[in-house]
């Protein structure tokens, strides 16, 4: 891996027209458990170039990087397509310590990428532009990868140029510890504060403490705050000097997270349960519409 403390892709982002060209560079310090394998879904688009640039900058301890091309995979991207061999050569030139390969397969994109996932790997996918995303059906290739993957998956918005703070969405006490610990590791490594966001579920169709004078309002709020503190307890133990801000906000969870993600460096989420009928899961909506990269951490991710 690189020990230079400069962006791992060097000029890859600008050369390929990727979204990561203006993103902040990440050094190799910080002590976070970082991916040893980086896998980038490659279709030659500007979105894929942005995902490549972000993923390699993000993983200074990477030992290998694979650009995965799935032949005959449905709709092809608009605009000029970039050659994976040229992209791989740029990464090799900038970082000869990373073993860079191009893999070509026939099959289903989600199955191919998820099949390469694992706790030691980071799967990176380029996000669609928001205007396209709003019209998508209830499923997408990126979300199918998330559902099948056994390790972290990141979706990098094509328009992303950088930000501050690391956000983590907290669903409840059943959240896997690896989600908040991954977010904390990212914040610690990037020397940013960790912002933990929780949106209480509505009760009887109304928000928590629906009536201002209702004694249950304070009880519910106190209970939500205690739950968030309990979920964050392993983080405070592992990163005692990390600045943590908690936000408990009523509203629609996806809207709250998307608003908080504007100007953020990263949004970290778990795989949330199935939503009510005719509504996208919060994780899926965030992946499609977030202004910041969304890192989804499945519950089986190991932190060793």
Image (tube, rainbow, N blue to C red):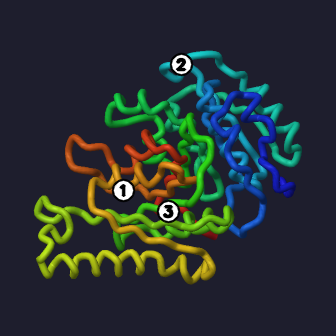
* Residue ID at (66%, 44%): 54
Q: Position of residue 226 (x, y in %)?
A: 35, 81
Mark 1 lies on residue: 272
Q: Nearer the viewer, residue 142 or 253?
A: 253
The secondary structure type at the circle numbered 2 is loop
User: Which is in the foreground here, disc 3 or disc 1?
Assistant: 1
The first of marks 2 and 3 along the sequence is 2
Cα distance, mark 2 to mark 3? 33 Å
Q: Is residue 4 visible?
A: yes
Relative to 124, residue 188 above or below: below
Q: CA distance from mark 2 to mark 1?
A: 30 Å
Q: Are marks 3 and 1 in contact (CB under 8 Å)?
A: no
Which residue position is annotated with label 3?
300
Tell me what residue is drawn at x 82 percent, y 46 percent: 98
Instruction: Look at the numbered disc 3 and give the secondary structure of its residue.
Output: loop
Can you identify the residue that label 2 sits on? 76
In front here: 182 or 212?
Answer: 212
Going from N to C along the chain, the mark reached first, 2 or 1, is 2
x and y, in percent, of residue 31 in the image: 72, 69
Q: Is residue 15 left or right of residue 237?
A: right
Q: Which mark is residue 241?
A: none
Sequence-first tag of 3 and 1: 1
Q: Is residue 61 left or right of residue 121?
A: right
Image-quadrant location for residue 87: top right
Total number of numbered discs in the rendering:
3
Q: What is the quadrant of the C terminus in the image?
A: bottom right
**Which secondary structure, mark 1?**
loop
Between the C-alphas of marks 3 and 1, the distance is 13 Å
Residue at (32% x, 36% y) in the render: 138
Say if residue 1 shows up in the picture.
Answer: no
Please, is residue 95 above or below residue 211 in the view? Answer: above
Q: Position of residue 195 (x, y in %)?
A: 49, 66
């Amino acid at each position: 891996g690189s020990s230079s403390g400069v962006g791992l892709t060097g000029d890859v982002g600008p050369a390929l027209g990727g979204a990561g060209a203006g993103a902040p560079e990440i050094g190799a310090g910080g002590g976070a458990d970082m991916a040893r394998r980086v896998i980038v879904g490659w279709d030659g688009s500007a979105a894929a170039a942005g995902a490549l640039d972000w993923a390699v900058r993000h993983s200074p301890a990477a030992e290998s990087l694979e650009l995965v091309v799935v032949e005959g995979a449905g709709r092809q991207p608009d605009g000029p397509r970039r050659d994976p061999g040229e992209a791989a050569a740029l990464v090799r030139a900038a970082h000869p310590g990373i073993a860079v390969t191009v893999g070509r397969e026939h099959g289903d994109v989600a199955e191919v990428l998820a099949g390469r996932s694992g706790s030691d790997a980071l799967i990176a996918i380029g996000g669609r532009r928001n205007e396209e995303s709003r019209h998508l059906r209830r499923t997408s290739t990126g979300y199918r990868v998330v559902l099948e993957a056994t390790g972290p998956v990141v979706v990098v918005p094509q328009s992303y140029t950088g930000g501050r703070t690391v956000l983590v969405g907290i669903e409840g006490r059943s959240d896997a510890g690896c989600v908040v610990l991954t977010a904390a590791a990212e914040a610690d490594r990037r020397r940013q504060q960790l912002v933990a966001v929780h949106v209480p579920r509505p009760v009887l169709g109304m928000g928590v403490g629906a009536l201002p004078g209702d004694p249950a309002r304070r009880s519910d709020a106190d209970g939500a705050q205690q739950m968030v503190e309990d979920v964050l307890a392993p983080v405070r133990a592992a990163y005692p000097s990390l600045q943590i801000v908690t936000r408990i906000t009523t509203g629609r969870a996806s809207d709250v997270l998307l608003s908080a993600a504007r100007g953020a460096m990263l949004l970290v989420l778990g795989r949330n349960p199935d939503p009510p009928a005719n509504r996208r899961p919060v994780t899926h909506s965030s992946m499609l519409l977030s202004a910041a990269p969304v890192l989804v951490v499945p519950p089986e991710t190991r932190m060793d």
